[in-house]
Image (cartoon, rainbow, N blue to C red):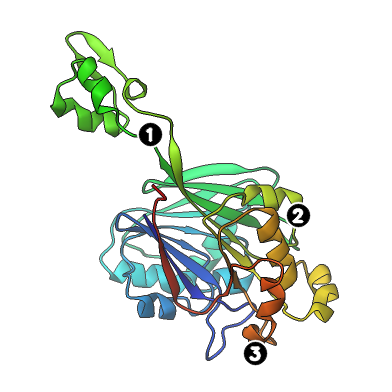
């Protein structure tokens, strides 16, 4: 299963009742943070999931509302007793951005492993058993959307294992994807596992215009977390000019992608009551949820 917590839902600047958009993902006790704007440490603390188990921070892009909280976060992580390396992932320019932001946090008790993903094609990386795929999107600077996936292998065929006379003490290794040798025979997982089953897919998309490529990228997601910078349809021209989305555009994208559930986030500071416009989105995609700070969910395998 996969736990997700939408730490904040704001865009541009933190507000007294709305932190900047970021997402915390947890699997088997390890975590990934997506974006780290100013003040992100506060909802992190409020979520009560801990900070030390965070193994990676993914950046969608390098505007201040998505990265300015990094120095304080790194210092707090160091004070938590973490010594294992931390992975920082983002579009081109991550080295320069991290070097600039860490001037005030130069001595950390752990290493920073920087991974730069291309802004011209999709890319893949994995951390703590979580598979991450990126897609370049349409913003004013290089920007990525992310899909977080848990792969799931096929069911273990007990009858087939017995037919092949595989000792029970080898079954666990085969289920973990390892080869075993029995009486000079090499047994591979494919010999005793069925077809791969549907895993879990969560996609996070902010600061972009909609596109067919994005609809395909999020296809069949269990949860699609998407920016809704503007609720009022009269602000469509602003969304087009500033490379953002309206509620209705995000909902249409969710519909095209055949996702199971949509959470809207990254609201404009001028959008004081997102629920006022939520029915516009729901008229297009019924299972739309107005994101709110600290909204959390556990996503389980379907079978």
**Taking 53 as reference, is 268 above or below it?**
below
Q: CA distance from mark 1 to mark 3?
A: 47 Å
Residue drawn at (55%, 75%) of the image: 291
Residue drawn at (57%, 88%) of the image: 15
> From the viewer's perspective, is 216 left or right of 199?
right
Q: CA distance from mark 2 to mark 1?
A: 33 Å
Closer-to-camera residue (158/80): 158
Q: Which residue is mark 1?
A: 154
Between circles 2 and 1, the one closer to the viewer is 1
In terms of image quadrants, where is residue 248? bottom right
> Which numbered disc covers residue 211?
2
Q: Dot 3 lies on which element? A: loop
> From the viewer's perspective, is 168 left or right of 286?
left
Q: Which residue is mark 3?
A: 272
In terms of image quadrants, where is residue 30? bottom left
Is mark 2 in CB contact (under 8 Å) with mark 3?
A: no
Residue drawn at (46%, 43%) of the image: 198
In terms of image quadrants, where is residue 179? top left
**Taking 161 as reference, is 149 above or below it?**
below
Answer with mark 2 or mark 3, whichever residue precedes in sequence: 2
Q: Dot 1 lies on which element? A: loop
| Residue 105 visible in rendering | no
Closer-to-camera residue (88/16): 16
Q: CA distance from mark 2 to mark 3?
A: 27 Å
Residue drawn at (52%, 79%) of the image: 292
Q: Position of residue 83 (x, y in %)?
A: 28, 58
Q: Position of residue 133 (x, y in %)?
A: 55, 47
Q: Dot 2 lies on which element? A: loop
Is mark 1 in CB contact (under 8 Å) with mark 3?
A: no
Answer with mark 1 or mark 3, whichever residue precedes in sequence: 1
């Amino acid at each position: 299963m996969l736990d997700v917590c939408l730490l904040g839902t704001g865009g541009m600047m933190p507000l007294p009742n709305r932190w900047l958009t970021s997402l915390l993902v947890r699997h088997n006790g390890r975590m990934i943070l997506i974006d780290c704007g100013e003040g992100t440490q506060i909802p992190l603390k409020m979520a009560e999931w801990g900070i030390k188990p965070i193994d990676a921070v993914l950046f969608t892009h390098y505007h201040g509302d998505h990265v300015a909280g990094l120095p304080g976060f790194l210092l707090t992580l160091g004070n938590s007793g973490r010594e294992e390396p931390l992975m920082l992932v983002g579009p081109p320019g991550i080295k320069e951005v991290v070097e600039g932001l860490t001037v005030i946090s130069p001595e950390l008790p752990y290493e920073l492993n920087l991974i730069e993903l291309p802004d011209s094609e999709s890319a893949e990386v994995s951390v703590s058993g979580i598979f991450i795929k990126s897609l370049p999107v349409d913003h004013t600077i290089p920007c990525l959307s992310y899909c977080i996936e848990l792969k799931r292998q096929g069911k273990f065929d007990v009858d087939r294992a017995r037919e092949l006379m595989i000792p029970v003490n080898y079954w666990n290794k085969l289920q973990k994807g390892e080869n075993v040798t029995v009486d000079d025979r090499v047994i591979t997982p494919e010999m005793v596992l069925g077809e791969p089953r549907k895993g879990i897919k969560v996609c996070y998309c902010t600061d972009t215009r909609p596109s067919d490529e994005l609809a395909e990228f999020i296809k069949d997601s269990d949860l699609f977390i998407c920016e809704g910078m503007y609720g009022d349809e009269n602000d469509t021209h602003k969304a087009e000019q500033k490379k953002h989305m309206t509620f209705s555009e995000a909902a249409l994208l969710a519909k095209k992608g055949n996702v199971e559930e949509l959470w809207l986030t990254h609201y404009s500071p001028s959008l004081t009551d997102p629920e006022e416009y939520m029915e516009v989105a729901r008229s297009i995609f019924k299972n739309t949820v107005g994101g709110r700070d600290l909204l959390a969910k556990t996503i389980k395998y379907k079978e």
